[in-house]
């Protein structure tokens, strides 16, 4: 129940809307029936594309492209725009946001040309949704405000209320905007109530419940949740009902009404099982397990979360529900004192989190590459246009030889040329800045991808040591488990942060060093000499020291007679000094691309002060700027 409660965004797919059930075979038959009117056939394709958008985006795109080609052949501008809207939606579902924006913008251009304000309002809303997903609140608000303005201008109160809900959703995603969120939700509520729109009221009541839950006003949250459930039962909306039951169970959990919460979770599980909704089912089991965990009923928590994990694995590939299940199982086994199982699920949690982060980073890199290509193409087009314009103006000047005309025309052309030159140069500079920014963002994402690569051998070695310790020294084994748990908790919690306090990093290093000392016995040590007054106000990139210590262990010999000692001290002004004796291994270690280059790349994005590394007096020295 620690997962963020989300509002539902009103996605305006198109003016025609969609029915709950779509008969694909019937629609295909209508399309292939050439005796039908072109508009009827195009409407069939349009409806089919929408029906595929969420579940089969590739199919939706193919159908929409077929619709677009036919509409272009018939010069039917509005249907071209609707096809582009469908293509934008398919790209949005696949997280290809640059392409989605391109399709939506072209759709908007055609709808403006056709004067179709109703569909234009819908596409503005869809474009706002893409910017909302990308956390570009100003653009999202700008486009949804255009939807609202068109709805109000045409007297479409229903569409205006839908826009209010969308605006509320956008404000909700940014902290400190609860007042604005409630303002727009209540505006929508008043309109829906006057229109007696049960679908709209279901949406707005559910969102009001979510906002009040975030504000810990459980009575208000429950009041609006009950209204949502009543409407969903009346409409026979079983999927929506399952979601609302989940939300009510969450509220009951916060109120300490655990028996009622479990009853709602069980009913939700029945519905999702009947619907075959694996994601909903896994989420329900996870939430149930988490509630059992908070009550200290660990056997029941393990049972629920094992079911969640089994269901999540049926979904295929790494997913958030599997990660939540492993986290719950880790905590449950840890509280039971079953450290071996706890560590097993901690490792699985880490693996899942890293896999998800790598996937998301890879997707962002693909999107950035598309954006960079668009920027470069635009830059090249501007430069080509500028050259053509200058060539054209020079040709005109050469052509006009009349003395009286040259004085007037030459000055006019010079002014035109200068104005155009300044315009194109300014635009070229802007595009170059955008391209540079995208290159920087691409580097940032590449570094983020590197940061997920925590050495798995460390965990395997630690588990091997633990297996030996359990039979030799139970007390030391318990301390080892505690420090290993602290280390991996830090890695999970902090590796996505840009900076942490020096004290936070050192607390982690003490746990990490404890594990290495047990592993290498009397062959390894870390000596830290830092003044207390700098620990809280100076910051460092998380895992920096861990990578440097790992680098020292990996590349240097150690023995009881000559232990490897890594020293950490401070060098003014605000520079961390990490040193270890140079004793290269007989067989050089294979480099993985982590370590120093990782640190240097990260700090290149944080500060102009470089990380320095080199040899000095038989020591390997690294100087890291403290921020």
Image (cartoon, helix red, strand yellow):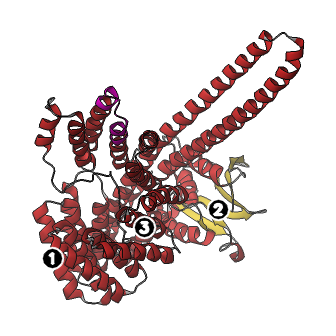
Q: Quadrant location of residue 63?
A: top left
Q: In the rendering, at what x and y percent does residue 402 appear? A: 85, 11
Q: Quadrant of the C terminus?
A: bottom right
Q: Is residue 342 above or below residue 46?
A: below
Q: In the rendering, at what x and y percent does residue 99 appear? A: 43, 40
Q: Nearer the viewer, residue 554 or 255?
A: 255
Dot 2 and dot 3 residues touching (CB under 8 Å): no
Residue 211's label in the rendered image is none
Q: In the rendering, at what x and y percent does residue 251 appear? A: 30, 83
**Is tag 2's residue or tag 3's residue first in the polypeptide sequence?**
3
Q: Secondary structure at mark 3?
A: helix
Q: Quadrant of the N terminus?
A: bottom left
Q: Is residue 149 above or below residue 372?
A: below
**Could you tell me how far apart the alpha carbons at marks 2 and 3 are, in whole angstroms?**
59 Å
**Could you tell me how far apart the alpha carbons at marks 3 and 1 are, in whole angstroms?**
34 Å
Q: Is residue 291 visible?
A: no
Q: Quadrant location of residue 250?
A: bottom left
Task: Judge whether residue 448 is colored magenta.
Answer: no
- Badge 3: residue crowd in 10 Å (few <14, some 14–19, many ≥20): many
| Residue at 65% from the left image edge and 37% from the top image edge | 432
**Could you tell me how far apart the alpha carbons at marks 1 and 2 are, in whole angstroms?**
56 Å
The residue under label 3 is 164
Instruction: State which region is magenta.
Output: 70-83
The residue under label 2 is 567
Q: Secondary structure at mark 1?
A: helix
Dot 3 and dot 1 residues touching (CB under 8 Å): no
| Residue at 78% from the left image edge and 63% from the top image edge | 572
């Amino acid at each position: 129940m620690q997962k963020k409660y989300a509002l539902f965004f009103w996605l305006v797919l198109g003016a025609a809307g969609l029915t709950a059930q779509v008969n694909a075979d019937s629609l295909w038959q209508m399309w292939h029936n050439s005796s039908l009117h072109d508009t009827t056939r195009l409407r069939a394709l349009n409806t089919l594309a929408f029906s595929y958008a969420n579940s089969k985006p590739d199919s939706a795109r193919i159908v929409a492209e077929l619709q677009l080609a036919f509409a272009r052949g018939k010069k039917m501008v509005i249907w071209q725009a609707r096809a582009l809207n469908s293509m934008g939606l398919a790209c949005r579902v696949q997280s290809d946001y640059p392409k989605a924006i391109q399709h939506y913008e072209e759709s908007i251009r055609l709808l403006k040309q056709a004067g179709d304000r109703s569909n234009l309002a819908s596409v503005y809303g869809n474009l706002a949704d893409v910017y909302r997903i990308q956390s570009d609140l100003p653009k999202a608000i700008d486009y949804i405000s255009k939807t609202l303005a068109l709805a109000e201008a045409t007297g479409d109160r229903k569409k205006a209320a839908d826009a209010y809900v969308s605006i509320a959703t956008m404000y909700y995603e940014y902290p400190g905007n609860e007042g604005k969120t409630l303002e727009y939700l209540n505006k929508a509520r008043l309109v829906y109530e006057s229109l007696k729109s049960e679908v709209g009221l279901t949406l707005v009541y559910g969102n009001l419940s979510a906002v009040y839950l975030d504000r810990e006003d459980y009575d208000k949250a429950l009041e609006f949740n009950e209204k949502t459930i009543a409407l969903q039962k009346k409409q026979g909306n079983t999927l929506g009902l399952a979601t609302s039951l989940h939300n009510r169970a969450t509220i009951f959990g916060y109120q300490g009404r655990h028996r009622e919460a479990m009853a709602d979770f069980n009913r939700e599980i029945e519905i999702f099982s009947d619907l075959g909704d694996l994601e909903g089912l896994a989420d329900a089991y996870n939430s149930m397990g988490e509630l059992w965990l908070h009550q200290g009923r660990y056997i029941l928590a393990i049972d629920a979360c094992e079911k969640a994990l089994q269901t999540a694995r049926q979904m295929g590939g790494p997913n958030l529900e599997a990660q939540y299940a492993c986290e719950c199982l880790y905590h449950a086994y840890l509280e039971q004192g079953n450290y071996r199982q706890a560590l097993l699920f901690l490792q699985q949690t880490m693996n899942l989190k890293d896999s998800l982060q790598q996937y998301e980073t890879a997707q962002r890199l693909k999107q950035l590459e598309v954006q960079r290509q668009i920027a470069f193409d635009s830059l090249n087009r501007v430069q080509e246009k500028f050259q053509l314009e200058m060539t054209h103006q020079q040709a005109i000047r050469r052509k006009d030889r009349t003395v009286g005309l040259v004085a007037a025309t030459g000055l006019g052309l010079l002014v035109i040329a200068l104005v155009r030159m300044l315009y194109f140069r300014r635009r070229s500079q802007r595009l170059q800045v955008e391209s540079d920014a995208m290159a920087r963002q691409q580097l940032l994402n590449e570094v983020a991808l590197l940061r997920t690569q925590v050495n798995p051998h460390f965990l395997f070695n630690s588990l091997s040591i633990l297996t030996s310790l359990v039979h030799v020294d139970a007390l030391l084994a318990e301390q080892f488990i505690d420090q290993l748990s602290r280390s991996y908790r830090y890695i999970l919690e902090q590796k996505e942060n840009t900076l942490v306090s020096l004290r936070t990093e050192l607390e982690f290093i003490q746990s990490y060093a404890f594990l290495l000392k047990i592993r290498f016995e009397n062959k390894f040590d870390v000596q830290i000499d830092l003044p207390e007054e700098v620990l809280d106000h100076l910051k460092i990139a998380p895992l920096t020291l861990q990578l440097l210590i790992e680098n020292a262990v990996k590349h240097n010999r150690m023995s009881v007679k000559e232990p490897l000692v890594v020293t950490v001290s401070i060098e003014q002004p605000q520079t961390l000094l990490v040193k270890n004796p140079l004793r290269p291994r007989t067989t050089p270690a294979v480099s993985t691309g982590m370590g120093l280059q990782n640190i240097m790349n990260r700090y290149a994005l944080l500060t102009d002060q470089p990380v320095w590394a080199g040899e000095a007096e038989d020591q390997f020295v690294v100087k890291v700027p403290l921020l």
